[in-house]
Image (cartoon, rainbow, N blue to C red):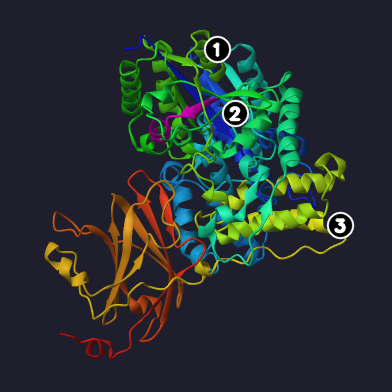
């Protein structure tokens, strides 16, 4: 039994570069919004508990955007949403108004929208029109209120302490342009504190700062991508390969240079983008003088495959020796990290921290190492959108408990490595498996045809300047090539992740292609064609005969003749954190459509949004008592959709989980049904 467990947190801060290369204007506001929420709040929680010690990983692309955001504020190059909101109230074309409203509705429904009654009212009024493309039922005052409420919802717990913000929260509605201007001024002031506060926490030794290769590239794929390694992608006209060791080195070197410029010294460690590693990638880190890096536990076990590998190996760093030097690797405890990222958000804060501390102490008690280390690594901004009060109760309780625990010692990764080396308690890796913290592989960025087609376009763009290093190219060309090598485009290609902002990501990617191709005297090729799966989704089975469920336990068999869609076979669109449902069942009786979601986990609510034949939204039916079906169900009058016999119904489903995640199905397309003909009942009769 060990007397002490080192608890090494690494919180990763990253946003992709949203600046359009043609005018330098950020097309999305997420650097600004996460800055006034997750980033500022994380620093505040640490400032208020000096006994807490953590590693913060800040990407160069984020750091430069924070600087640019402050420099551009109030000028022609401030982000697009900021400029649009400053102009309110004003008349907008329907298309521009819909895009603005869609962005202003981007907030967690339960944690960020529901506490603001006017915000919830406006969102629920707009939602059916946004889903269907109908005209938005908002006047100028509504739109101004929506802009203020969006910025209030995104204000983190530190910013909400300001009296001016408290006054706006109390006012609640009927905001003026002066209200919005005052709120934006406060938010700019909050953003301006981030870099000085990071430096101060680092200088007093409470925080260690690390970084990531420049534009957050998937370093193993940049070092070498062979499309034959992803046979599941399918549909490729011909295999291709892409290898840019010099570009990989460029991203690492630029990251060190940016870090040194902002913090006065080079970093000693890196979190590779998405925890993606390979031997070639780690070699690049060794060349840059990195002492350590980190990835997920699954890659430790893959790397040690074939040997007896107790789980306790996870509780110490391991060295990989490369021709350019050795790098120590920490491997994150997947389950404990994900409990913070996805589970504890629905727990009372004190109970969540007690559970985590209990599990950490059990790790300590079960370890034979003299001084084991557990690495907890996760995003530093995304979880807090789903936590009550922007995560303040949880973070305060967490840092307080760890700072005062007799057997759990918060440490930075560098401190953990120093202690392990002093005790000669560092393992050695015979090899390093290639993969990331998502599934232990790289499929998320290359595992579909559309993703590989994106890499093929990058390969064509880079080949226009073959034989030249990025530093030898005109700066705009080099900047666009670096941007195209970032990970985020390939995350959104394909149908495994949903975002309502896909069009903005696609335009940014193609804008960078235009810069590169036109510099070489060519017009760029079009973007990857969407997978055929993005056509309207059709049922796995049509209904066999009418169904007449009424929400009673005895009616379970009424669904046996229903048609269905399989969630699992629809490209992963149903999952963001875990799979919660198996099938969507549907059936008809005269004048009524019945829909049920066959679920595997508790669900709070479901919503169906129809685009055709009439834009409408419907909430799930709440059956009372123990007689309720074990499904979430809908009962929709076809007359409400103006859907007669033979009509086509096109729709999308949203599910809200027990812990308030909103899951979308299908991603980036619609599902399609056909109302049966009047002869359906007799035509489908069978024995």
Query: In this rendering, does residue 162 appear at all?
Result: no
- Marker count (numbered): 3
Quick one: label 3 or label 1, which is nearer the N terminus? 1
For label 1, the residue is: 418
Q: Give the distance between the C-alpha atoms of the residues marked 1 and 2, in whole angstroms.
A: 19 Å
| Label at residue 57 | 2
- Is the Cβ of the residue at disc 1 closer than 8 Å to that at disc 2? no
Name the element at disc 2: strand
Quick one: label 1 or label 2, which is nearer the N terminus? 2
Q: Is residue 365 above or below residue 140?
A: above
307 or 155: nearer the eye? 307
Which quadrant of the structure image shows residue 523? bottom right
Q: Residues within 10 Å of mark 3 (few under 14, many from 20)?
A: few
Query: In this rendering, does residue 644 appear at all?
Result: yes
Name the element at disc 3: loop
Image location of residue 487, percent across then percent down: 62, 46
Q: Quadrant of the C terminus?
A: bottom left
Q: Give the distance between the C-alpha atoms of the residues marked 3 and 1, in whole angstroms.
A: 50 Å
476 or 125: nearer the eye? 476
Q: Is residue 120 above or below residue 186?
A: below
Quick one: label 3 or label 2, which is nearer the N terminus? 2
Nearer to us: label 3 or label 2 = 3
Q: Say which residue appears at 65% left-offset and 38% top-offset.
A: 184
Q: Say which residue appears at 74% left-offset and 23% top-offset.
A: 260
Q: Residues within 10 Å of mark 1 (few under 14, many from 20)?
A: few
Which quadrant of the structure image shows residue 644? bottom left
Name the element at disc 1: helix
Specify the segment rendered in magenta: 329-339
For label 3, the residue is: 520
273 or 394: nearer the eye? 273
Image location of residue 294, percent across then percent down: 54, 29
Which quadrant of the structure image shows residue 31? top right
């Amino acid at each position: 039994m060990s007397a002490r467990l080192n608890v090494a947190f690494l919180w990763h801060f990253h946003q992709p570069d949203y600046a359009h290369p043609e005018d330098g204007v950020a097309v999305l506001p997420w650097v600004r919004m996460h800055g006034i929420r997750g980033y500022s709040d994380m620093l505040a929680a640490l400032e208020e508990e000096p006994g807490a010690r953590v590693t913060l990983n800040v990407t160069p692309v984020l750091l430069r955007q924070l600087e640019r955001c402050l420099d551009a504020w109030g000028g022609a190059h401030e982000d697009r949403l900021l400029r649009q909101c400053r102009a309110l109230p004003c008349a907008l074309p329907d298309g521009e108004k819909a895009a603005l409203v869609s962005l202003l509705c981007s907030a967690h429904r339960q944690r960020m929208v529901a506490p603001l009654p006017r915000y919830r009212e406006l969102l629920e009024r707009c939602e059916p029109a946004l889903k269907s493309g109908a005209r938005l039922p908002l006047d100028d005052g509504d739109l101004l209120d929506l802009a203020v409420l969006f910025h209030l919802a995104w204000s983190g717990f530190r910013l909400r302490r300001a009296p001016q913000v408290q006054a706006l929260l109390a006012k609640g509605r009927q905001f003026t342009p002066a209200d919005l201007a005052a709120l934006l001024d406060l938010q700019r002031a909050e953003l301006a504190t981030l870099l000085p506060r990071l430096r101060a926490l680092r200088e007093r030794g409470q925080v260690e700062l690390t970084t990531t290769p420049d534009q957050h590239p998937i370093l193993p794929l940049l070092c070498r991508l062979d499309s034959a390694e992803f046979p599941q992608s399918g549909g490729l006209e011909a295999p291709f390969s892409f290898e840019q060791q010099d570009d990989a080195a460029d991203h690492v070197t630029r990251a060190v240079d940016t870090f040194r410029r902002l913090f006065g010294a080079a970093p000693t460690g890196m979190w590779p983008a998405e925890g993606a590693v390979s031997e070639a990638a780690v070699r690049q880190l060794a060349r840059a003088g990195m002492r350590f890096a980190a990835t997920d536990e699954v890659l430790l076990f893959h790397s040690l495959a074939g040997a007896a590998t107790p789980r306790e190996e996870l509780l110490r760093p391991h060295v990989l020796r490369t021709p350019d030097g050795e790098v120590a690797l920490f491997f994150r405890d997947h389950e404990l990290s994900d409990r913070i990222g996805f589970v504890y958000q629905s727990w009372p804060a004190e109970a969540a921290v007690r559970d985590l501390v209990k599990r950490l102490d059990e790790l300590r008690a079960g370890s034979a190492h003299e001084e084991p280390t557990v690495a907890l690594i996760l995003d530093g901004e995304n979880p807090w959108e789903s936590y009550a009060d922007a995560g303040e109760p949880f973070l305060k309780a967490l840092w307080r408990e760890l700072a005062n625990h007799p057997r759990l010692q918060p440490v930075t990764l560098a401190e953990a490595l120093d202690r392990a080396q002093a005790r000669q308690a560092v393992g050695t890796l015979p090899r390093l498996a290639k993969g990331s913290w998502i599934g232990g592989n790289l499929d998320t960025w290359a595992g579909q045809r559309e993703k590989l087609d994106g890499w093929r376009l990058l390969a064509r763009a880079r080949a226009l300047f073959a034989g030249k290093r990025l530093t030898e190219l005109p700066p705009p060309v080099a900047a666009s090539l670096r941007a195209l090598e970032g990970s985020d485009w390939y995350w959104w290609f394909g149908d495994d992740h949903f975002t309502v902002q896909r069009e903005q990501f696609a335009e940014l990617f193609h804008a960078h292609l235009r810069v590169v191709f036109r510099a070489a005297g060519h017009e760029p090729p079009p973007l990857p064609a969407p997978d055929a799966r993005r056509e309207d989704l059709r049922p796995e089975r049509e209904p066999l005969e009418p169904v007449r469920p009424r929400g009673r336990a005895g009616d379970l068999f009424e669904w046996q003749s229903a048609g269905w869609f399989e969630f699992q076979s629809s490209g992963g669109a149903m999952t963001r954190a875990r799979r919660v449902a198996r099938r969507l069942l549907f059936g008809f009786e005269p004048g009524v459509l019945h829909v049920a979601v066959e679920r595997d986990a508790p669900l709070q609510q479901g919503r169906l949004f129809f685009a055709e034949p009439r834009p409408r939204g419907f909430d799930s039916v709440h059956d009372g008592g123990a007689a309720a079906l074990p499904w979430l169900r809908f009962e929709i009058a076809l007359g409400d959709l103006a859907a007669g016999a033979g009509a086509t119904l096109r729709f999308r489903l949203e599910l809200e989980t027990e812990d308030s995640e909103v899951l979308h199905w299908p991603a980036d397309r619609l599902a399609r049904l056909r109302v049966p003909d009047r002869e359906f009942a007799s035509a489908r009769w069978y024995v």
